[in-house]
Amino acid sequence: MKRRALTGIQPSGTPHVGNWLGAIEPALALSESCEGYYFIASYHALTTSRDPELLRQRILDVAATWLALGLDPTKTVLWTQQDVPEVTELAWILSCMASKGLLDKAHAFKDAVTKGKKFVSAGLYTYPILMAADILAFDSDLVPVGRDQKQHVEMARDMAQRLNHVYGELLKLPEPLIQDSVAVVPGTDGQKMSKSYSNTVPLFLPPKKLRKVLMSIKTDSKTLEEAKDPDTCTVFALYKLFATAAQQQDLAARYRQGGLGYGHAKQELFVLMNDRLASPRDRYNELMARPDDIRDILTDGALRARVTARATLDRVRGGVGL
């Protein structure tokens, strides 16, 4: 029997290269050997989204992105979070197992406090509980995540272990799956690529706009003639994610010998990235021109996802006395 892999992406902004390489690509690779369960985290987006029409559009955008990059809806399950209500019911039961001390440790909450945010919603504070329900409702074996998201899987395990300790073995314990080579994708400023840092490289930009974004990557002030260190350069860090070993070695050598400007390196990065994205970009544009087809895929996925989630919830309900 195949193991089940689950992951999700918030529709909180335009999908970017970090989403693709850090989450989507590893998840799709897993679908060759695992049952793939992939969802659009629309409820999680409500912690920041306040524009209904924009949220609806972004949900379609994320779905089209997964499909354009290779998700086969006949072999995997793709749905939106709000269409599987069993998850939010399970989240309440888990909230009765989660301690305040556990939630206080969550990265998103601690970051909000550190930055002195005036408004921290209960949704943001209990974010890890809903994420745990997302994972546990589907008896997930593996959860492909970025290194910064590993904590959420660990917290899901903590909640499941607590519930299992009190009521018996009701929930499966998932494992995080992190591929070190793509776990953290740098953004245009050298930090981790993230919508919150405004440093992303959006997927499916027209070639001219993609090139403009890549040309904006921050570098040091070394002149063309000076030798440069590829190991400390954001341009080269992104280049490695698209280049062959031979291409990496060649560009690294040219960095070190001098005579290579950062503009040249950015152009070589653009050529590789644009070639890799050309076919998915066409597929994405075709899908976005037919939004009803995307909605049909999501509806079918939700029906299949609910079968699994319902079985888990019925098991938990019975176990806790409901």
Image: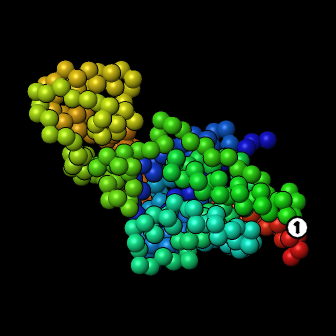
> Residue at the spot x=40%, y=72% of the render?
116
Residue positioned 23% across, 23% down in the render: 256
**Quadrant showing the N terminus:** top right
Asked if 206 appears above or below 100 in the picture, the reply is above
Within 10 angstroms of label 1, few (less than 14), some, or many (20 or more) residues? Answer: some
Which colour scheme appears in the figure?
Answer: rainbow
Report whether 4 appears left or right of 73: right
Evaluate whether residue 282 shows in this view.
Answer: no
Q: In what element is the residue under mark 1?
A: helix
Can you say which quadrant of the picture contains the C terminus? bottom right
Give the labeled residue for mark 1. Answer: 319
Label 1 is placed on what type of residue? Gly
Measured as percent of width and height from the top left, residue 93 is found at 75, 72
Residue 3 x, y percent position in the rendering: 73, 44
The residue at the point 67 percent across, 38 percent down is: 33
Residue 65: in sight, yes or no? Answer: yes
Estimate the x, y position of residue 141 in percent, counting from the top left: 71, 47
Q: Nearer the viewer, residue 291 or 175?
A: 175
Percent coordinates x, y for residue 224 in the rendering: 11, 31
